Amino acid sequence: MWIILEYAAWAISGGLLLWMLADAARVNREFDEDVLLSSREGVDELIEHGEVPEAEGSKND
């Protein structure tokens, strides 16, 4: 019984590995390196719609 569970766990692990590799390849194909390495999440979508809020430190008070 334990042997079957062990093989099932290895099969699930292998499936997850293949899924992660396929997803990494898909993301690499769909997005440019500049977007993937950007530390400003969500800003790219806001720029497209013209909704970028001012940063707190850049206000001229």
Image (tube, rainbow, N blue to C red):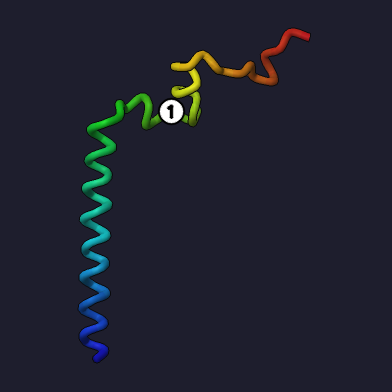
Residue 16, picture quadrant = bottom left
For the view shown, which residue lies furthest in the top direction?
60
Give how far across and how far down residue 6 sits, in percent.
Answer: 25, 81
Q: Which residue is mark 1?
A: 38
Which residue is more in the foreground, 59 or 53? Answer: 53
The answer to which image quadrant residue 48 occupies is top left
The quarter of the picture where the C terminus appears is top right
SS label for mark 1: loop
Furthest toward the front, the residue is: 49
Q: Dividing the picture into quarters, in which one does residue 37 lie?
A: top left
* Number of on-image labels: 1
Residue at position x 21%, y 55% from top?
A: 18
Image check: 50 left or right of 17? right
* Percent of width and height locating residue 52: 56, 18
Badge 1 crowding class, 10 Å Cα cut-off, few under 14, some 14 to 19, many 20 or more, is few
Residue 13 sits above or below residue 5 on the image: above
Does 45 sit left or right of 18 as displayed?
right
Foreground: 39 or 26? 26
> Measured along the vertical axis of the image, is residue 21 above or below residue 1?
above
Whole-percent x, y for residue 15 in the image:
22, 62
In the rendering, at what x and y percent does residue 41 appear? Answer: 49, 31
